[in-house]
Image (cartoon, rainbow, N blue to C red):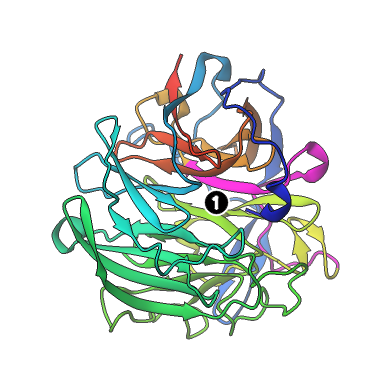
Amino acid sequence: MKRLLILLTLPILAACAGLTKPAAPMVTPIVLFTPTVGAAPQVESQPQPLATSTTPPPAYASSFPNPTDYKWQPILSGLYRPVDIQPANDGSDRLFIIEKNGLIRVYKNGQLLEAPFLDISDRVSEAGNEMGLLGLAFHPDYETNGYFYVNYTGADGNTRISRFQASGNSADKNSETYLLIIEQPYQNHNGGALAFGPDGNLYAGLGDGGSAGDPQKNGQNTKSLLGKILRLDVTNGDPYAIPADNPFGNEVWAYGLRNPWRISFDRLTGDLWIGDVGQNQWEEVDYLPKSWGSGANFGWSVMEGSHAYDSEPQSGMALPAAEYSHAEGGCSITGGYVYRGAIPEWNGIYFYGDYCSGKIWGLTLVDGLWKSQLLFETGTTITTFGLDESGEIYFASDNGTIYHFEIK
């Protein structure tokens, strides 16, 4: 989310889940790089070959279905500013929904449980509009160890990444173990997303520290944890270890990000997707294949998307898989997920949206080219997407409503 202090002056539109006619897809060449330890990756011109076998299923959809045959169905309302939706992946089919003021709620069997799963509102600060309880991830062995991780801003305004332990539908708020406390120079650009990768490590998206234009130039400083994707080994160490193949000898896994608002791993391929909020002109989707390893530089603040910001576009930086401009009506990207549910024609399409306009796009890879298409005009503010245990997709609105993707 970006500049939400301004956005709060906008009227919250009634949830209409409206649809738009399919737009002509935008086509972007896939830009690959070879990561180099301790340095920016080098740009290459040719994509890697794609698998053509349909067993296992292809990684990407070959075309976009007709969106007018589908809808976003509201399933839950009355929440306080939901910003994350996560499953525990423990076979319980529960969805855990973050309310930004410090609560995690449980949605099960079509009902919102009255008692919160976790209430840490006593230690979460919402003093700034981009502050609060912002991210949640469940340990891959949550079913046996009960561990889950949160990202929030404390009373001092600094980011905390912490571990808690739970049993059943209740977490022990006194079980908090700090992994990191990261000083935030400003109130905005806190990032906040957490996700476990296919390697079992915990990844965290951190913004550049805030203000505008990255005044401290954290994005390109690999010694700073701001403007980065961090990678922590939470299986070893106390409370974590730095993986030996992290490229800079610290927690940094990838860099050059302004405000990564939602990150996700494709559950089929293990690839990493990032929605990075732009400055004044461009919003971007960044993509990091599992096979390419560490050290990716996504360009900020040298570049905003694929365009010059501090200086002319440079080689050695990973260009976006997709971008859209503020001139098109957007203002703040909300990164999403690759659909892996029960509607086969949508499998392999990455959903992402815009907070202000309520637009939802799809992105897929066809013949080595990224194709992005505007699919839905929801008429509401989109704060986050989420997948359940079955790979079905949802989104949350800042008006407190959760929507589920369905066939009409």
Determine the image quadrant of residue 243: bottom left
Q: Amino acid at mark 1?
A: Gln
Q: Residue at x 63, y 62 (%)?
A: 259
Q: Residue at x 66, y 30 (%)?
A: 374
Judge by depth and name the residue closer to the eye, 321 or 3.
3
Report the residue that reaches farthest toward the front: 122
Q: Residue at x 58, y 59 (%)?
A: 260
Q: How many marks?
A: 1
Callout 1: SS: loop
Task: Report the side of 123 relative to 236 (left or right).
Answer: right
Residue 380, horizontal then vertical, whole percent: 61, 33
Residue 268, horizontal then vertical, whole percent: 37, 45
Task: Report the side of 164 relative to 189 (left or right).
Answer: left
Residue 328 part of the magenta segment: yes
Range of magenta residues: 312-337
Residue 217, horizontal then vertical, whole percent: 72, 78
Q: Is residue 142 visible?
A: yes
Judge by depth and name the residue closer to the eye, 58 or 229.
229
